[in-house]
């Protein structure tokens, strides 16, 4: 090869190297920032864009606009409607028996903080600010400033990375938690390294019970009559022996009530200085108080999101940032005379899920794709330019965000609640929900043996944990009965559909490591009543 050809070859190599560098830089610039926003117990039907009886109260104008400019998921569900297990599934992409977090008290192994780990591999800086509630230090994140446990509504303390050794690394703050958490995230975004993409988990405490709003919302809805669900009063065909009792013997202690139905926990007993027991309209008054306190916290979240969104737009971050808004589960807002979550009923297991990303998601999209909280991590990883690892059991729904069809998608989503008769007196149960139907089995027994109860704080606080509640099935035709008012399990017209759902339930329990082989007493109950 002569000198001329060598020179040409050298120049070609230099040009190729420059092209590769430019391509690499261009690729990195294309990676979106990701802000994952999650509130606590924010029911989908307490967001205006989801419709329903509360949609005319102008609760969430900022979230409604976000949905109008992005995509709203109608069928997003958790697989366990309680804080810690749901959050564990979100960050691991796994179902509870695989990630090990079955209830509120179990700690997520720090090695399983998979989502930030995977995004860091893709070049992201990672942070979590606000409610964490997975007990162990969020060590996989580059930065954290999180509430200890549930945290406080006012003047909350935080555990902050770089301020000492966990869990003694506490710092103080002043103000309402929703305001403080928003300020902290904005400050973080002001100073984050803009040379690489960032991933921020921005988590509110609100509107978790016991609801405490910032004082400026005390008059919000003050003179408004909040619409009530019909099932607060009248539901003769709802439920089963597992939820109502065989002859009303259990009805007074299953499920924390709004009315004075529950002998230990009802809303007017907890929150009125003078109990309303015996007053004709006690359920109405308790419901109004419950909803107004809850919705004032919701309003505080939405206003703070308006501040956060304005900041992103002002700083030029809006267009290249994926914004996710969701909650760790839903919330019973008086339906079936129930409060709190935990149940497999729609209001509890449904999660609001809204995404905004102008570079990919067309405005005004609404999808009925059936997703659950194990799918969130795989989707964000793929948005970041990676592939979900095989150890994650969820699936990416990025095709839906692109306006395309998903291939071989699930037809039903699995659910299980483990904490039998603890806190809000909800019996243990599991089931599946398809787009049109729901099948639930109340096996009614705690997974721990009674000899273990005394080792836990709840062991002596709640009546009836050691008792098995009635074992029963419930089936709802959601297309014709969206309020779940009529249990049709014994209706011969649905026999074939129920058989198919039982087969699907069994299949998913085996596929996702959700069987009861480690809990033989529960396994025996399931086998006995699985006809």
Image: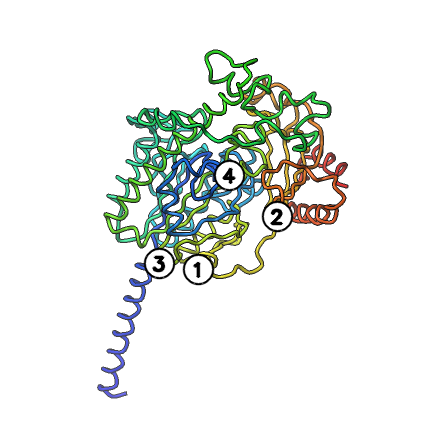
Relative height, residue 1 to residue 365 (above, below): below
Callout 4 environment at 10 Å: few (<14), some (14 to 19), or many (20+)? Answer: many
Count of numbered labels shown in the rendering = 4
The residue wearing badge 1 is: 402
The residue wearing badge 3 is: 359
User: Left or right: 80 with respect to 24?
Assistant: right
Front: mark 1 or 4: 1
Q: Which residue is drawn at 67% across and 49% down?
A: 504
Q: Do the residues labelled 3 and 1 touch (CB within 8 Å)?
A: no
Secondary element at tag 4: helix
Front: mark 2 or 1: 2
- How far, Cα to Cα, is label 3 from label 2? 33 Å
Callout 2 environment at 10 Å: few (<14), some (14 to 19), or many (20+)? Answer: some
Sequence-wise, which precedes: disc 2 or disc 1? Answer: 1
The disc placed on residue 86 is: 4
Secondary element at tag 3: loop
Q: Residue 508 in the image: state x and y as whole percent.
A: 64, 48
- State the residue lying farthest toward the bottom: 2
Q: Quadrant of residue 47?
A: top left
The disc placed on residue 436 is: 2
Q: Quadrant of the N terminus?
A: bottom left
The disc placed on residue 231 is: none
């Amino acid at each position: 090869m002569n000198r001329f050809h060598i020179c040409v070859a050298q120049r070609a190599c230099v040009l190729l190297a420059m092209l590769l560098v430019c391509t690499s830089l261009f690729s990195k610039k294309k990676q979106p920032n990701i802000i994952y926003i999650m509130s606590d117990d924010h029911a989908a039907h307490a967001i205006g864009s989801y419709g329903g009886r509360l949609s005319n109260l102008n609760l969430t104008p900022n979230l409604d606009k976000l949905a109008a400019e992005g995509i709203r998921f109608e069928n997003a569900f958790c697989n366990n409607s309680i804080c810690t297990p749901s959050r564990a599934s979100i960050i691991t992409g796994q179902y509870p028996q695989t990630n090990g977090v079955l209830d509120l008290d179990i700690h997520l192994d720090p090695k399983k903080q998979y989502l930030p780990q995977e995004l860091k591999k893709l070049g992201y800086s990672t942070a979590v600010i606000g409610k964490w509630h997975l007990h162990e230090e969020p060590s996989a994140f580059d930065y954290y400033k999180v509430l200890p446990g549930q945290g406080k509504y006012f003047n909350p303390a935080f555990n902050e990375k770089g301020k000492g050794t966990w869990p003694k690394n506490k710092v103080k703050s002043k103000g309402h938690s929703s305001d403080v958490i928003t300020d902290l995230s904005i400050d973080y975004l002001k100073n984050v390294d803009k040379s690489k993409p960032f991933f921020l988990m921005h988590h509110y405490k609100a509107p978790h019970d016991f609801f405490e709003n910032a004082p400026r919302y005390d008059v919000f809805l003050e003179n408004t009559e909040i619409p009530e669900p019909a099932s607060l009063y009248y539901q003769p065909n709802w439920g089963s022996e597992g939820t109502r009792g065989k002859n009303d013997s259990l009805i007074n202690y299953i499920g924390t009530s709004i009315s004075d139905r529950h002998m230990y926990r009802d809303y007017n007993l907890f929150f009125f200085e003078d109990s309303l027991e015996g007053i004709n309209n006690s359920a109405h008054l308790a419901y109004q108080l419950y909803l107004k306190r809850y919705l004032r916290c919701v309003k505080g979240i939405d206003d703070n999101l308006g501040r956060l969104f304005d900041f992103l737009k002002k700083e030029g971050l809006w267009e290249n940032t994926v914004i996710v808004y969701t909650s760790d589960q839903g919330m019973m807002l008086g339906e079936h005379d129930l409060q709190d979550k935990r149940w497999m009923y729609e209001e509890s297991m449904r999660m609001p899920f809204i995404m905004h990303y102008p570079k990919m998601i067309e405005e005004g999209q609404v999808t009925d794709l059936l997703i659950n909280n194990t799918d969130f991590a795989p989707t964000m990883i793929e948005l970041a330019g990676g592939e979900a690892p095989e150890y994650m059991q969820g699936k990416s729904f990025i095709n839906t965000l692109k306006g395309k069809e998903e291939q071989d998608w699930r037809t039903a989503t699995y659910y299980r609640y483990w904490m039998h008769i603890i806190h809000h007196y909800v019996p243990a149960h599991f089931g599946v929900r398809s787009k049109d139907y729901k099948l639930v089995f109340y096996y009614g027994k705690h997974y721990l043996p009674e000899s273990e109860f005394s080792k836990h704080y709840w062991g002596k606080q709640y009546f009836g944990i050691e008792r098995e509640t009635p074992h029963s099935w419930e089936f709802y035709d959601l297309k014709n009965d969206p309020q779940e008012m009529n249990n049709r399990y014994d209706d011969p017209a649905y026999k074939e559909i129920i058989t198919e759902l039982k087969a699907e339930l069994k299949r998913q329990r085996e596929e996702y490591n959700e069987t009861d082989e480690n809990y033989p007493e529960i396994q025996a109950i399931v086998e006995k009543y699985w006809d």
